[in-house]
Image (cartoon, helix red, strand yellow):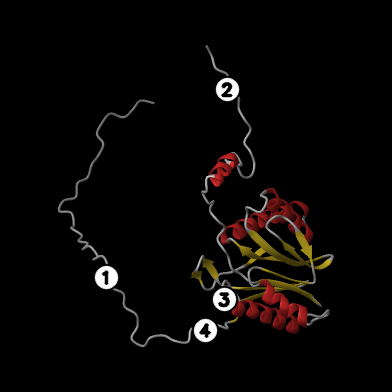
Amino acid sequence: MSKSVIEIPPKGGFSFDLCKRNEMLAKKGVNPPSFRKTGTTIVGLIFQDGVILGADTRATEGPIVCDKNCEKIHYMAPNIYCCGAGTAADTEAVTDMVSSQLQLHRYHTGRESRVVTALTLLKRHLFNYQGYVSAALVLGGVDVTGPHLHTIYPHGSTDTLPFATMGSGSLAAMAVFESKYKEGLTRDEGIALVAEAICSGIFNDLGSGSNVDICVITKGGKEYLRNYLQPNPRTYVSSKGYSFPKKTEVLLTKITPLREKVEITEVGEAMEE
């Protein structure tokens, strides 16, 4: 007797098949795993010639600082860049994916990418995953319609503002923007204000720290100011150096040369064609 096999089409996004199991475990007092707190300060503002983005350079893993000089300003297109806060793997993956789609779109149309195109691709992807992709983004760029600045939340909602902040240090940075931002800022004034906002997040938020990265995007191109400020230099280094106790002895490696060299040749009749 033959059994018929029904093929079920693959599902997109996350699988919610275990929701009932998780609900039963919660009723029995089993606490679900919580989200790990992340830390970042990312900002952006519009000035008279374009957009300025800024970010700190600290990457954390819980209470541990795992990278003191990471890059949080991601390339999207020659005229569009994006700051990422949240889970580093998610921000890298999302921005790389949309950057690739924008490149293909430019090949197909032969035109410069628009900021609203990148915004739509990012918000659709994040909305599909209902916040489980932990990527909070500040998107900025200059296209044929002028400078644009948007914020994108992990659930897919967006804001369009003249200045914006995201991340755990966003409140400290927003306090600087709300008190000192004005329309028609020059390039130097905008860079100084962005640097001050990032420093406010660095010194008032434990999840933010290290250096200040700034990206200036104008109609003529972009200028990436890597480590524009270093407000936390390493001031003390022990003159004696640092020594660590040996836990495992290194095994001795000895190379013994071969005494004889043997050559193997194949002997046999050739196959007839």
Query: Which is nearer the eye, 63 or 218?
Result: 63
Find out whether the residues at labels 1 and 2 contact each other: C-beta distance under 8 Å.
Answer: no
Looking at the image, is mark 4 or mark 3 earlier in the sequence? Answer: 3
Quickly name the residue at label 2. 5
Looking at the image, is mark 1 or mark 2 earlier in the sequence? Answer: 2
Spatial CA span between label 1 and label 2: 60 Å
Q: In the figure, is residue 119 to the left or right of 234?
A: right
Quickly name the residue at label 1. 246
Spatial CA span between label 4 and label 3: 11 Å
Query: What type is the residue that disc 3 sits on?
Result: Gly
Find out whether the residues at labels 1 and 4 contact each other: C-beta distance under 8 Å.
Answer: no
Residue 79, visible in the rendered structure? no
Farthest residue, direction front: 28
Name the residue rendered at 73%, 64% in the picture. Answer: 151
Name the residue rendered at 26%, 36% in the picture. Answer: 266
Circle 3 Cα neighbour tier, 10 Å, few/some/many (<14 / 14–19 / ≥20):
many
Quickly name the residue at label 3. 209
Circle 1 Cα neighbour tier, 10 Å, few/some/many (<14 / 14–19 / ≥20):
few
Looking at the image, is mark 1 or mark 3 earlier in the sequence? Answer: 3
- Quarter of the rendering containing residue 201: bottom right
Query: What type is the residue that disc 2 sits on?
Result: Val
Q: How many marks?
A: 4
Looking at the image, is mark 2 or mark 3 earlier in the sequence? Answer: 2
Question: As displayed, is residue 253 above or below residue 176?
Answer: above
Looking at the image, is mark 4 or mark 2 earlier in the sequence? Answer: 2
